Image (spheres, rainbow, N blue to C red):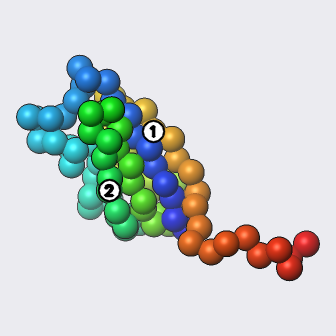
Amino acid sequence: MLFHIEQVHTPENCPYGRGGSPTLYDAKADGIRLVGMYGSFMEHVIYYIVEATDTGALNTFLLPGMKTCTARITPVSESPFDRSQK
């Protein structure tokens, strides 16, 4: 399943100059495929699209940033809503 993650940190906790954005997630987390990563860096927000097998995999992926970031996780789909199914 695909998820959109919005990860926010404060300017005081910004990873710039201390390893950067990759320090805020675990790229090798089992059950996760990072589809894309985008930043609004001056707003201290990072957006991820990930494919995850379960919520445990999502938690492991975000664990490195847990003490410095908040995250909003939203399931998303590539397919539009099928109106024929009622």
Q: Against 46, is 67 above or below? A: above
**In the figure, residue 15 lies in which quadrant?**
top left
Name, please, the residue furthest toward the top.
Answer: 12
Residue labelled with disc 1? 71
C-alpha gap between disc 1 and disc 2: 14 Å
Q: Which mark is residue 14?
A: none
**In the figure, residue 8 lies in which quadrant?**
top left
Kindly state the secondary structure of the residue where label 1 is placed.
Answer: strand
- The x, y position of residue 43, in whole percent, is 33, 32
18 with respect to 59 (left or right): left
Name, please, the residue furthest toward the right.
Answer: 86
Q: Name the residue: 45% across, 66% down.
A: 51
State which quarter of the image contains the N terminus.
Answer: bottom right
Residue 62 seen by the camera: yes
Q: Name the residue: 45% across, 49% down.
A: 5
Who comes first in sequence, dot 1 or dot 2? 2
Q: Which mark is residue 37?
A: 2
Q: Amino acid at mark 2?
A: Met
24 and 9: which one is in front?
9
Q: Against 47, is 12 above or below? A: above
- The x, y position of residue 9, in whole percent, is 33, 30
Residue 30 seen by the camera: no
- The x, y position of residue 78, in whole percent, is 56, 72
78 with respect to 48 (left or right): right
57 with respect to 74 (left or right): left
- The x, y position of residue 18, in whole percent, is 10, 35
State which quarter of the image contains the C terminus.
Answer: bottom right
Q: Dot 1: few (<14), some (14–19), or many (≥20) neighbours within 10 Å?
A: some
21 and 59: which one is in front?
21
The reply to whether the C-beta atoms of the residues labelled 1 and 2 are less than 8 Å apart is no
Q: Name the residue: 51% across, 58% down.
A: 3
Q: Amino acid at mark 1?
A: Ala
